[in-house]
Amino acid sequence: MKNPKWNREEIILTLAFYHKYYPSIPEKNSNEIKDLSKLLRKLSDSNNESINLKYRNENGVYMKLMNFHHLNPNKMNQAQKPLIIIAEDDKDLSTLIATQLEVAGMQVQVCHEASHVARYLKNNFANLILLDVHLPDDTGFNLMSDLRQVGDKTPIIFLTGENNEDKKVNALEMGGDDYITKPFGFPELIARINAVLRRAETVHDGEVTQNASTTDEPFEFCGAEVNPHRLEVTFADGEVESIGRKELGIFTYLASHPNKVLTRKNLIHSVWGIHADVSSRSLDQYIVKIRELYKSHSLTLDDFRTVHGVGYIYDLKIPE
């Protein structure tokens, strides 16, 4: 059975919750989401809508909040704002840091445990992590090591109350980008964040170009020839169409990973860079643009398929 349609009272209640926490959204397994789920189920019970009870669980509530987030027109204004994860177990300090960073024009996501950071980064992007060396469930050093092992290069600034030179050196040698000792002034913290972001932006601007031009040699994609050097696609009808670097990046990445299911996150990392704050919706708009381009030349892109809930696959048939 399909998820029952949300009624007016449920939407109002959930929307009020969303605005309370915006621009951040509590994690799926957080107490806040659990409490909202319980409240919605009580509402369904009181309205004799027992069919809704099992669908207003934590997962269903979180998905509805994410729908609000994707449809929020104000989120467009957030697109150019860097998103900073604050991994700090001191709730008062993390709230204070979050307030200062928001005033400075940044988005924030507060996590109080290392596991929360890891879960968040599986499905979301961040431009930088402010990482306390000591978290309740693990050390910041271990978390950084785990992230680097899976290829996550999100810049990290360590926060610590220990003014220990050996630990500072160790943190930087392990792959940290900066190290700041508590107590610190917020102007200094914000200046350090901006400095690290500038360095990361320079590096990843180059990576985007590199990803989109791994070869200058033309290659075939779904019945048309893509020319990276000229930023053109030549179709079987003889027509030549100009494309942008984002489209080229998508073509290149798909063509170099045939017969593999590629997540939206894979594609965004490849084309925009690992630290880009780009939504899946933006990627999907480029995919639609590519499909329409092929359709205008009577090509259907049958080999390029959507894997619902995951991403895409370029299902290249290899001749026997």
Image (cartoon, rainbow, N blue to C red):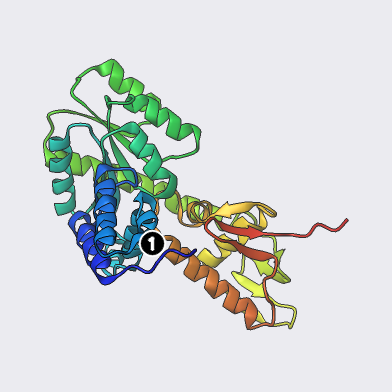
Q: Is residue 258 visible?
A: yes
Q: Which residue is mark 1?
A: 51
- Above or below: residue 103 compared with residue 166: below
Locate residue 303: give its quadrant: bottom right
Locate residue 18: give its quadrant: bottom left
Q: Residue at x 71, y 68 (%)?
A: 222
Q: Residue at x 31, y 40 (%)?
A: 129
Decide: few, some or many residues near mark 1? Use Cα within 10 Å; few <14, some 14-19, many ≥20: few
Could you say which is closer to the camera, residue 14 or residue 100? 14
Could you say which is closer to the camera, residue 230 or residue 174? 174
Q: Is residue 228 visible?
A: no
Could you say which is closer to the camera, residue 239 or residue 58? 58
Can you give x and y, in whole percent of width and height, for residue 289 in the image? 53, 74
- Above or below: residue 179 compared with residue 43: above
Could you say which is closer to the camera, residue 16 or residue 313? 16
Residue at the farthest right position: 320
Give amino acid for label 1: Ile
Locate residue 248: give its quadrant: bottom right
Can you give x and y, in whole percent of width and height, for residue 202 in the image? 39, 49
Q: Secondary structure at mark 1?
A: helix
Can you give x and y, in whole percent of width and height, for residue 93 in the image? 14, 36
Q: Quadrant of the C terminus?
A: bottom right
Q: Is residue 39 left or right of residue 184?
A: right
Label count reads 1
Q: Residue at x 29, y 52 (%)?
A: 37
